[in-house]
Amino acid sequence: MWKKLLIALWLGTIASLVGAQELQFGPGPSAPGQALDAIVAVVDDDIITRSELETELAGIRRQLQARDAEIPPENVLERQVLERMILQRIQIRAAERNNIVVDDQSINAAIGEIAQRNDMNLEQLRQAVERREGIPFAEFREGIGTEIAVARLRQRVVESRIRVSEQEVDNLLVGNNRPGGSAREYRLAQILIAVPEGANPAELSVARQRAEEVLAELRAGADFRSLAVSVSDGRQALEGGDLGWRRPEQIPTIFADVIPTLAVGEVSEPIRSPSGFHLVAVLDTRGDQQSAVTQTRARHILLTPNELVSAEEIRQRLLRLRERILGGEDFAALARANSEDPGSAARGGDLGWVSPGQLVPPFEEAMARLSPGELSQPVQTSFGWHLIQVLERRQQQAGGEAQRAAAREALFRRKADEEWEIWLRQLRDQAYVEIRL
């Protein structure tokens, strides 16, 4: 459970740090006298060694044991873990090609956030990682750096291109306002039988037949989660295909019409998507208790890089402004004098009351982690770099603009998730991969 908790917290931290600055990734040097590893996979110009695979396998076994999940046969587990490692290497190289780097300061900030949210100091966190989980702290740091880089990659190649129209928001709200339209949440899981991009009819036929065979096993009583670990090509395979709790507007578009027709425990017929054939199960349902939203009143200072001023210079300027504010200078006065946001600068940076979904995700995620009165580190978004301070929060009944903002955010997330899955599948198909197990 420790690793589960740490991973959940570091992923949340990473989302809010998608804009901070940078570190190059690459394989570290072998220790003196270290025996050469067998190569189990070649990924473009990179390799995965047997020792790296064994380290990952040990960690996955611990996770499966911690949640009392059935551990699949060794050859099945090995294949799934290796595929996850291959996809991670491909993403890291894609981040490098997009000039995405993560520096030590960003990693240190993420680790500090994890420690703080676990009520630990850094030494206690190190002990929890190394002694309780058996993970070298250097490996823990590298994992955080990788996740930050991937989060930035997703923001650059997918999220920056997502647009949600007002008509789409209207359509969603009309559906939610029908009787029973948004009264239920679904705990979903999936098994994906993947097909390559541009698959020919023969390949599609083989994949569909395989999906039908898996469906027959499920209907004959096979356990969905165990079968997902064994056969699914989805990124959630090692978690039993679990997609988590989804409100109707958060369900992937290709599943949206099918899910409400399924009873708990029921599995869909194969559903075709660009990635392959999906078998979706409803694991559980619950009523929607969300009748109010949390609104935040915040203010910010925005600075934007240009041809003459680099992003790092902007970040340093904001750090100096932050020190001045912490030293007692007035935030509003500094915002009026320095902020490049014409809409809020004249108001001392005040953004007024905002609901979830009204601001860009990196800003909202950073803002959500601040207590009233707290001042953020510099945060990067598509608009530039921000210094954020939360003034107060309140609960507001969902309706009007708050309801539209929540709907807009849900649609954005759904589109981003779908585009990211397609983009990753294309990236995997285009990579040179040679498996040498």
Image: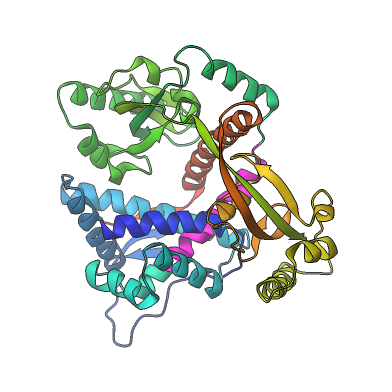
Dominant secondary structure (helix, strand or loop) of the stretch shown in magenta: helix
Task: Give percent across and percent down for residue 152.
Answer: 57, 56
Q: Is residue 272 above or below residue 55?
A: above
Answer with left or right where residue 342 lies relative to residue 289.
right
Q: Foreground residue, 337 or 284?
A: 337
Question: Magenta part of the protein: which range?
Answer: 142-162
Residue at point 41%, 34% (across, down): 195
Q: Is residue 324 above or below residue 2?
A: below
Task: Give percent across and percent down for residue 154.
Answer: 56, 49
User: Can residue 25 be spotted in the picture?
Assistant: no
Specify the farthest residue to the top: 179
Q: Foreground residue, 95 or 204?
A: 95
Task: Give percent across and percent down for residue 326.
Answer: 65, 73
Residue at point 24%, 53% (across, down): 78
The question of residue 286 being in magenta is answered with no
Query: What colour scheme has been applied to the protein in the rendered image?
Result: rainbow
- Check the picture and name the quadrant holding the N terminus: bottom left
The question of residue 155 being in magenta is answered with yes
Task: Give percent across and percent down for residue 401.
Answer: 66, 30
Q: Is residue 185 above or below residue 306?
A: above
Answer with left or right where residue 169 lies relative to residue 320.
left
- Check the picture and name the quadrant holding the C terminus: bottom left
Residue at point 31%, 73% (across, down): 136
Q: Is residue 106 above or below residue 69?
A: below
